[in-house]
């Protein structure tokens, strides 16, 4: 299992102060930034795109940016995000017409690539691409909004993916996204996750460093 990473979702940040907020969670101990891209088509909400990613880079954000695409079509926006400074780009299996091609497109643009699974999406999409991917993102809520409740059946799915990753012998990150908090992060880690997205659980706290430190404490317990 790879070292644990905490990835604040800046979807829950104050958008009017996005640069400062992003810098603040990094200073507070975040390992990477989770960047939620919503298109009001694949998901019923609209967030931000490559220009905002580029603006964060221009502002001086150097931490890895993990772009979670909730968009359809997928391929058109991939080169733009690579140019805007993304390190990892993940997309939803159902949103791509040609999953293998979209994964290859991400790699060809020099980024780590990954597939995202909604709570009800079967893992069989992994069967013929696991040798290609760097990250698997399991949604523990239905995508579109921050601040939702963790769906408990995700824990069994995390265990299944952990087995698939171990059997592959590859260094694939297992990321969990949605409703992650101090109260459930230990159980999520125990099931096999190593990358923890948290939006409201961090940004709704007054002290980001304390929120992240509490999560790390849980991960070590
Ligand atoms: C949901 C997004 C998540 C979300 C996480 O569609 O992909 O990243 O913002 O927010 P919390 O941690 O508040 O569930
Ligand atoms: Zn996300």
Image: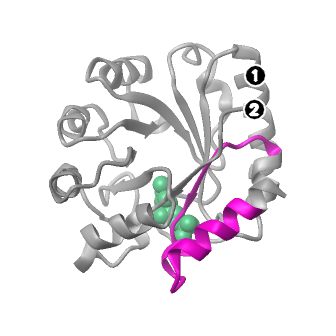
Picture residue at 31% right of the left edge, 60% below the top:
40
Q: Position of residue 146 (x, y in %)?
A: 50, 70
Front residue of 190/73: it is 190
Q: Which residues are magenta?
A: 191-217
Picture residue at 26% right of the left edge, 60% below the top:
48
Q: Position of residue 30 (x, y in %)?
A: 50, 58
Q: CA distance from mark 1 to mark 2?
A: 6 Å
Looking at the rendered image, the quarter that the C terminus falls into is bottom right
Picture residue at 32% right of the left edge, 43% below the top:
72
Does the image show residue 165? yes
The quadrant holding residue 100 is top left
Q: Is residue 87 above or below residue 120?
A: above
Is the Cβ of the residue at disc 1 closer than 8 Å to that at disc 2? yes
Dot 2 falls on a residue whose secondary structure is helix
Magenta segment: does it hold 171?
no
Dot 1 falls on a residue whose secondary structure is helix
Q: Position of residue 185 (x, y in %)?
A: 73, 60
Q: Position of residue 147 (x, y in %)?
A: 55, 74
Left or right of residue 5, residue 188 in this image: right
Q: Is residue 82 above or below residue 4?
A: above
Left or right of residue 121, residue 74 in this image: left
Looking at the rendered image, the quarter that the N terminus falls into is top right
Does the image show residue 147? no
| Residue 66 numbered mark, or none | none
Residue count near mark 2 (Cα–Cα under 10 Å), binned few <14, some 14–19, many ≥20: many
Residue ranking furthest to the bottom = 206
Residue count near mark 1 (Cα–Cα under 10 Å), binned few <14, some 14–19, many ≥20: few
Left or right of residue 158, residue 200 in this image: left
Please give the residue where the numbered disc 2 appears in the rendered image. 162
Please give the residue where the numbered disc 1 appears in the rendered image. 166
């Amino acid at each position: 299992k790879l070292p644990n990473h905490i990835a604040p979702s800046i979807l829950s940040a104050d958008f009017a102060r996005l640069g400062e907020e992003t810098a603040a969670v990094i200073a507070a101990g975040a390992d990477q930034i989770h960047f939620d891209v919503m298109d009001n088509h694949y998901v019923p909400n609209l967030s931000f795109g490559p220009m905002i990613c580029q603006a964060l880079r221009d502002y001086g954000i150097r931490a890895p940016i993990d772009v979670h695409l909730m968009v359809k079509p997928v391929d058109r926006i991939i080169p733009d995000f690579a140019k805007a400074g993304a390190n990892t780009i993940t997309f939803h299996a159902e949103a791509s017409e040609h999953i293998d091609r979209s994964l290859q497109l991400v790699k060809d643009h020099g980024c780590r690539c990954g597939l995202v699974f909604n709570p009800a999406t079967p893992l069989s999409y992994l069967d013929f691409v696991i040798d290609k991917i760097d990250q698997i993102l399991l949604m523990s809520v239905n995508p579109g909004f921050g601040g939702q409740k963790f769906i408990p059946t995700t824990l069994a799915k995390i265990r299944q993916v952990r087995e698939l990753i171990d059997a592959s012998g590859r260094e694939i990150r297992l990321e969990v996204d949605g409703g992650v908090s101090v109260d459930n992060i230990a159980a999520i880690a125990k099931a096999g996750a190593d990358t923890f997205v948290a939006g409201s659980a961090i940004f709704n706290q007054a002290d980001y460093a304390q929120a992240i430190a509490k999560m790390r404490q849980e991960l070590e317990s």
